[in-house]
Amino acid sequence: MRKTSQRKPAGEWDMLRHPPDFSLVLGGPLFQLMRRVHLSDDALMMVRQRVIVIALLAWLPLLLLAGLEGNLWGGPVAVPFLKDVEVHIRFLITLPLLIVAELVVHQRMRPLIQQFLERNLVPENGLSRFEAAIASAVRLRNSVFAEVLLIALVYGFGILVVWRHYIALDTATWYATPTAGGSTLSVAGAWYGYVSLPIFQFLLVRWYFRLFIWARFLWQVSRIELSLIATHPDRLGGLSFVSGQVYAFAVLAVAHGAILAGALANRIFFAGATLPQYKGEIVIMVIFMLCLIVVPLLVFTPQLSQAKRSGLREYGTLAERYVREFDAKWLRGRASADEPLVGSADIQSLADLGNSYGVVQDMRIVPITRDALLRLVGATLAPIVPLALTMMSLEELLKKLMGILF
């Protein structure tokens, strides 16, 4: 039969010859602003400069203003600035982690598109949809409207509702004094509420937006009928590089653990609470991070399940044919008398076929490993562990940890 050649669109040829880097973070108005003020380059380097400038913009004015108002260490308030653990963790630990996470995620995800193409996972008839998914993700990432909407969300909901009614301490602090009608902000509190917190919350919600883009991209790719190979040694049909992206978000998980640790520390130190009172919040934070990072990968489960079923059926049929011929040849006397059994390639082929069938049987239909789950849970809990010192001494804590580990 004569084959007819089909001309590929120019975009597909370009993508095949020069696969683009994939990045969730290399774009958007804020990224362009960082480039213009020389706090970033095209590869998201200059992390130290960004961390120093943004962290000091959010934290240093608070230090100076609280000092001028006499609320730095003591004064008439119950929570002076230097004793406010939450604010220091938020701006000197969590905020830098959110910035560092950008570089980590960018570098880990750069070869993602190349991996899909080099492993021939996207069939020729799915290349146009694959390219469309990439273009759609890039458009969302670079959207000016999206970032303006995030800023509006931060000021309209994050500050006026969430912070004022659910996060701010209900006691006299360096940033606010409770009154009958609500609370009155100090000068430092005004900077805190309308500059520092919005910077922090914008960087945080922008990460949620990026994770939405990531989940949407994975869903769109999962709608393409991928060429998964059931006997691939990664036990994921060749998709192990996608599940490996979980590790890229470990820094983000640490940042979320630090957010919770700071909030709990203030309530333990100034409101008389104890760490066990917040075990529910800790569990919720762990589940929240797993849902953010792990659940999007489950979109590939139907295709992995189908590939495994097909592989078991096809390799089962192949194995049936082979073992019957092997049985007839070596056990039913069909082998020629001068053909030696020792050293026969038939034995090795039978073993190889068994190994291949075993690989198909061990294929995972959920692209998540136990190691990845444990690392994410550990990264989220790591900043909270030091709060256990409020319940026991360091020596007792180390003994318990050693007992668990060894």
Image (cartoon, rainbow, N blue to C red):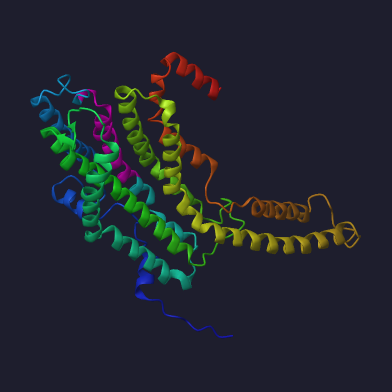
Judged by its main secondary structure, the magenta piece is helix
- Give the percent coordinates (x, y) of residue 344: 79, 53
What span is in magenta?
Answer: 82-104
Q: Residue at the spot x=77%, y=56% of the render? A: 346
Q: Is residue 244 left or right of residue 17?
A: right
- Give the percent coordinates (x, y) of residue 148: 21, 56
Front residue (pair 308, 188): 188
| Residue 85 among magenta residues | yes
Q: Quadrant of the N terminus?
A: bottom right
Quick check: can you spot residue 92?
A: yes
Front residue (pair 301, 116): 301
Q: Residue at the spot x=84%, y=52% of the render? A: 341
Q: Quadrant of the C terminus?
A: top right
Q: Residue furthest front?
A: 180
Front residue (pair 169, 205): 169
Q: Residue at the spot x=40%, y=19% of the render? A: 389
- Quarter of the figure with residue 214: bottom left
Q: Is residue 115 left or right of residue 70?
A: right
- Give the percent coordinates (x, y) of residue 302: 56, 60
- Give the percent coordinates (x, y) of residue 129: 42, 70
